[in-house]
Image: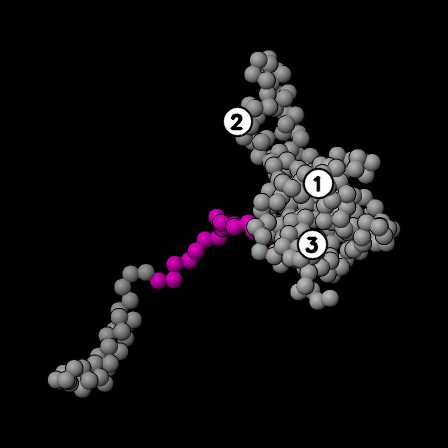
Amino acid sequence: MSEGAFHPEDRARSSIDRQLIVCGWVVQSRSEMNLGAGRGVAVREFQTASGPVDYALFVARKLCGVIEAKAEGTTLSGFSDQAERYIHDMPANLVRDEGQVRFEYVASGTEMLFRSCGSRPSSHRVFAFHRPETLEFWLREPQTLRTRLRHILEAIDPDALAAHVPKDAREQEQKRAREAIKEKAAILFDDPKLRTLLKGVKAATDIRIDTVSVDAVVSSGWDERKAGDTVARFKKFLEEKRDELVAPADPLS
């Protein structure tokens, strides 16, 4: 049967199947589910407490995300909450760690939204599914980059600090609470590789102002010879172009 005879969402799933395979995923139906078939396995029509999700994503046998398929031309942004609901309604026996199932795609086969569910998640467009190795790397990270950056901003924002510190606490307790928030934000920089990377980026983009070298004055004031040369060149130009400059105007112009 030609693909044109399929339901619009079936055509989207057919396109998604091909894209997943290109990105290194093994695509299976629920009845033939074999999580050992590859590093990343996408299982179609996976059952949750709120109904079947179009695809459940497994990396290294661990459930980590979902894909919700929609017909081409559908406004995808309205379905992120639906995909998130499937994430929350996954079978409890498959979810061992908090934040394990956090990768969410809403795709039509021609466009795609992605978000990593966590603190204040937001969707953004991507051009392809992430490879299983990429999601596996992100799963090893205890916090998303967005969450880490939020902690850094809160550590230097007086209003955010005040919101985390009890108003009726004694001054010493307030100080300890503020320090705890700052230490939590600084955990990101405990990684020596990251510190080295940041130093390299800073060194490459630094703008240095030279306050040591002394500039030498090459010339200043009136240069009579140079002025004479300029006047002589202008006189020569007038002589060469005199006929053009004094020619009578064209009466038809």
Query: Vertically, is 141 above or below 44?
Result: above
Of residue 146 and residue 250, the one placed in the foreground of this image is: 146
Q: Amino acid at mark 1?
A: Tyr
Residue 102 location in percent, x, y? 71, 41
Residue 119 location in percent, x, y? 64, 35
Q: Which residue: 80% across, 54% down? A: 28
User: Which range is magenta?
Assistant: 204-219
Marks 2 & 3, CB-CB < 8 Å contact: no
Q: Is most of the magenta stretch helix, strand or loop?
A: loop
Query: Vertically, is 217 above or below 224?
Result: above
Instruction: Name the image quarter holding the C terminus.
Output: bottom left
Q: Amino acid at mark 2?
A: Asp
* Res 233 visible: yes
Q: Earlier in the sequence, mark 2 or mark 3?
A: 3
In the picture, residue 86 is in which quadrant? top right
Marks 3 & 1, CB-CB < 8 Å contact: no
Q: Nearer the viewer, mark 1 or mark 2?
A: 1
Residue 127 location in percent, x, y? 63, 57
Which residue bears the numbered disc 1? 86
Give me the disc on residue 129: 3
Q: Tell me the crowding category of disc 1: few under 14, some 14 to 19, or many 20 or more residues within 10 angstroms, Cα based.
A: many
Give me the disc on residue 159: 2
Q: Which residue: 60% across, 42% down? A: 122
Helix or strand or loop: what does disc 2 sit on? helix
Instruction: Name the image quarter holding the N terminus.
Output: bottom right
